[in-house]
Amino acid sequence: MKDKSINILFKYGTIVLMIAIIIYFSFISDAFLTYNNFSDILRSISIVTLLALGVTFTLVVNGFDLSVGSTMSLSTVITASLMVWYDLPLWLVLILPILVGVLVGMFNTLLIVVIGIPDLLATLSTMYIVAGLHRTYTEGYSIYNNMPLVSGGTAPGELSQAFLWIGQGKMLGLPVPVWIMLVMVFLTYLVLNHTRWGRVLYMTGGNAEAATLSGVNVKKVKFSAYVISGVFASMAGILFTARVGSGQIDAGAPLLMEAVAAVFVGYSVLGAGKPNAIGTFFGAAVIGILLNGLTILNLPYYAFDIIKGAVLVSALAVTYVHAKNRFSAG
């Protein structure tokens, strides 16, 4: 009976929790269960979901990327500076920060695959290095339209309306960031679940030695996973800049924990038992809905981390108890 309860909780706990949260806050506040509020929730989780999708790819290959928050912060200030400081065209503003994410992913791969530093330690080091780079690049200042420059005068450029539309506009009744998030979740799901490369990624994460004996170049697979993680973090930074209309330093630091929590909560969605795109999206949605409801209740923002930590601990507890039961049964 206990094992059955754990299995049911593992498979459907996240979805049941989401429904319970929605029902509870709907009774508490009339403003909760409205189209505008749920539209705002989806917009708010779009950036976290992009970060979490990057972490998902690294977890699939049995790695872990702690540098996504810092990479997002670097992308945020670079994106803003390219328009505000250098007045570059939109296409360059969108491409160059993504290339920065690729470089961060390559640096992580150098540390992990070539030198052999464990994933957590390597990406922790990268997190500090990249955080220092973006603070040095901006000299500790946020970047905004017509800002005064240290060299004198004001910045020549500003964030264009076309760029701001990416983060603030709407399309077919939904915010543009929501469409971007849904497309990325769908593409990630297709890649991981319906392509040969996705199977290779899971094979590498499940047993690297067996994958090598099967002819898989494990180093190249891990390289691709960390580069993709950097790209997703850079996309999150671009989206954040377009949403708030400025380049905020340390923008990604508070979102790292939410992204990690979303991925691990997603392990148990419909009993997947592994990193997956749909689960990551549901994990981000659970956290976003919960935080939105607590905001409506006027819970102090500094208490939110307690809630995030509790959700993560609960998800990990259910996942590892389920894994322990399966191992015992085997």
Image (tube, rainbow, N blue to C red):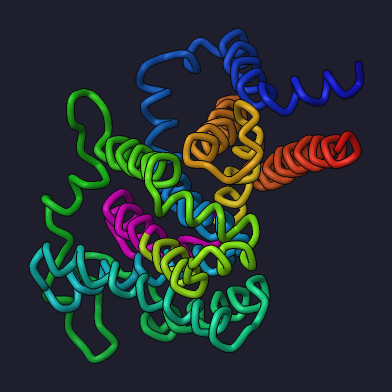
**Image point (53%, 69%), residue name:** 67
Query: Could you tell me which quadrant the C terminus lies in?
Result: top right
Vertical position of residue 209 compared to residue 298: above or below: below
Residue 78 falls in which quadrant of the image?
Answer: bottom left
- Which residue is nearer to you in this view: 205 or 112? 205
Instruction: From the top left corner, tell me how far across and down residue 34 is, in percent.
Output: 41, 14
The answer to whether residue 303 is above or below residue 57 is above
Relative image position of residue 222 (x, y in whole percent): 50, 68
Q: Quadrant of the N terminus?
A: top right
Residue found at the very far front of the displayed protein: 214
> What stretch of residues is rendered in magenta?
232-255
Q: Look at the picture and state if 164 lies above or below 156.
A: above
Residue at the image position 27 percent from the left and 66 percent from the top: 144
Query: Residue at coordinates 55% horizontally, 80% vertically from top-left?
Result: 113
Against 79, is 315 above or below? above
Residue 73, horizontal then vertical, whole percent? 43, 67
Q: Is residue 298 left or right of residue 218?
A: right
33 magenta-colored? no
Residue extending farthest bottom: 151
Is residue 244 a member of the stretch shown in magenta?
Answer: yes
Please report the residue visible at 40 percent of the width from the left and 84 percent of the height from the top: 139
> Which one is nearer the viewer's eye here, 164 or 298?
164
Determine if residue 90 is in view. Answer: yes
Residue 70 seen from this side = no
Where's residue 21, x and y in %?
Answer: 63, 20
Viewer-closest of 267 and 50: 267
Q: How many marks?
A: 0
